[in-house]
Image (cartoon, helix red, strand yellow):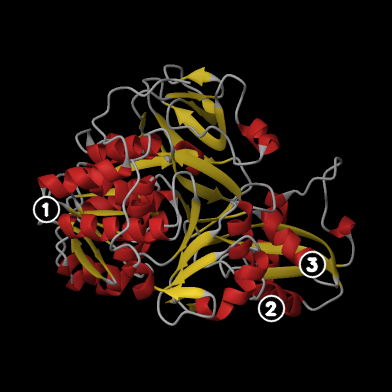
Amino acid sequence: MTSLPHIAAAPTAWEALERAAALTPGLEAVVAPDGRATFAELRASSARLARALAALGVGHGDRVGLCMGNSVDWIAVFLGLSRLGAVTVPVNTRLTAGEIGGILDDAGVRRALFSGRVLGADFAATMPAIRAAAPRLAGVVIQGDAPDGALNWATFAALGDDTPLPPPPDPDADLLIQYTSGTTSFPKAVPLTHRQMLANGFVSGQRLGLRAGDRMHSARPFFHVAGTTLSILACLQHQATLVTMTRFAADPALELMERERCTHFSGNGTMASMLLDCPGRAQRSLRLRGAWLAADSDTVRRVIGELGAAETVTGYGLSEASPNVAQSAWWEPEEIRILGAMAPQPGLEVRIAGQPLTVAAEGEIEVRGWSVMRGYLGRPDATAEVLTPDGWLQTGDLGKSTGDGRFTFAGRLKEIIRVGGENVSPAEVEAALCAHPQVSFAAAFALPDARLGDVPAAFCVSNAAPEAIRDWVAVRLASFKAPRHVFCVPTVDDIGLTASGKVQRPALAARATRLLEQSR
């Protein structure tokens, strides 16, 4: 594996926090729905929660689930766990109780911390179902009223008043286990180390142009690696204030950016389009200097021209690479940044269709080096499918090299459905559909959506009403995974498979589009 070059990143998350608290103690570290905290205050609360976690028996290498909305508390728990050398297992708050429990069980989590309520989810009420799906889950801390067998937040936080802390962790110890959807029916676990995430976030923030005192708006969920590496850790290392919200919506986001005098915005193309097309945007006085975007050229051009974010950059990555593989930089010519021509992170090797970036080529993006995962947790078969024996991560994404050491992202070769920034596996949707007693076969695919990018849809072999199947699945999958459209056919032959029995998803998407147009 290519070694990590000299990058001025802190070696561990806790050392990054201590450095920020020493350099800029009175500067705000985070503004969130549950309050504000300076870097000094964040260090104090993180240390207290580290002692509380230690009092519960959490130590080096222990995996702790974190199922909470974006908040000061989320960051403090994450950094407190990093001080103990424990491993955070962030859990998507939008998942069902069974899905949450399944992830906690797969990761071997014995202790987990939950919000009381997030966006309609009531974890106190669903805790019995979560525990049923995670039989090894022994200790639960929950905000608000705690159900039987769980600690409430105040009682938990007070546990650490007199508990000593162990020695700090090694930089190459795991900091986080990120679950990512793939082509299998269950998400895969990606362990990432302190050194990988800290270096990755540092370079991303550097190329974005973050400086001490800057204020970055990012509603990226903290349960995604774009929330931890590219938001929390990037801001922490550059002593920038992270301004966040529980759920992204354009008008509240614009109001928050104006009120908090944000200098930067981080988001995907869907978020950027929502900001640009928001009717109330004209009434807002923004002070944006730059943005981190995963978006097409037209959207990037509009963000620069209409939002005034002249230093906007684009990035490409995936969880298996910590996540940033490549990014443009704020000091580069505007046209390069608009076109999405990105240079790899320092020390990473990238090739397109097996060719180095000095050769113009189009094909699969492959990456090798210090930010690439060691492998999926407990999944040697899945690891062998994406990591070559000599260390190349086959991303399943399409890129186009410019021949001068840069490349552009050209689309996803994988069959993942991208729903407003969330990854949805067709196999997971199909498994849920086939659990219906009147569905014998299902084929899921992506349909274009003006707001979310894609939405799931499916053809099913069934004699049931499509609406009944859709409603049945909607209570068994997270809302972003549930198919928006269901089409029923009498036999598998009516779906149309290849000679080898594979689903032709693009053909199904085109067919579904025609059916929807005819029904209007």
Frontmost of labels 3 and 2 is 3
Mark 1 falls on what kind of element? loop
Frontmost of labels 1 and 2 is 1
Residue type highlighted by circle 2? Asp
Of the numbered discs 3 and 2, the one sitting upstream in the chain is 3
- Residue 79, numbered circle: none
Q: Is residue 198 above or below residue 302?
A: above
Q: Is residue 243 above or below residue 199?
A: below
Task: State the image coordinates of residue 270 (x, y, percent, origin top left).
Answer: 41, 59
The residue that appears at 52% across and 80% down in the rendered structure is 147
The residue that appears at 75% across and 48% down in the rendered structure is 504
Mark 3 and mark 2 in contact? Answer it, CB < 8 Å. no
| 259 displayed left or right of 155 | left
Badge 2: residue crowd in 10 Å (few <14, some 14–19, many ≥20): few
| 310 displayed left or right of 64 | left
The residue that appears at 61% across and 64% down in the rendered structure is 101
Of the numbered discs 1 and 2, the one sitting upstream in the chain is 1
Residue type highlighted by circle 3? Ala
Residue occupied by mark 3: 435
Mark 2 falls on what kind of element? helix
Task: State the image coordinates of residue 59 (x, y, percent, origin top left).
Answer: 44, 49
Considering depth in this image, is 437 or 303 the residue closer to the camera?
Answer: 437
* Residue 61 visible somewhere in the drawing: yes
Q: Quadrant of residue 172?
A: top left
- Give the position of the C terminus as an image quadrant: bottom right
Residue occupied by mark 1: 25
Mark 3 falls on what kind of element? loop
* Residue 298 visible somewhere in the drawing: no
Q: Quadrant of residue 277?
A: bottom left
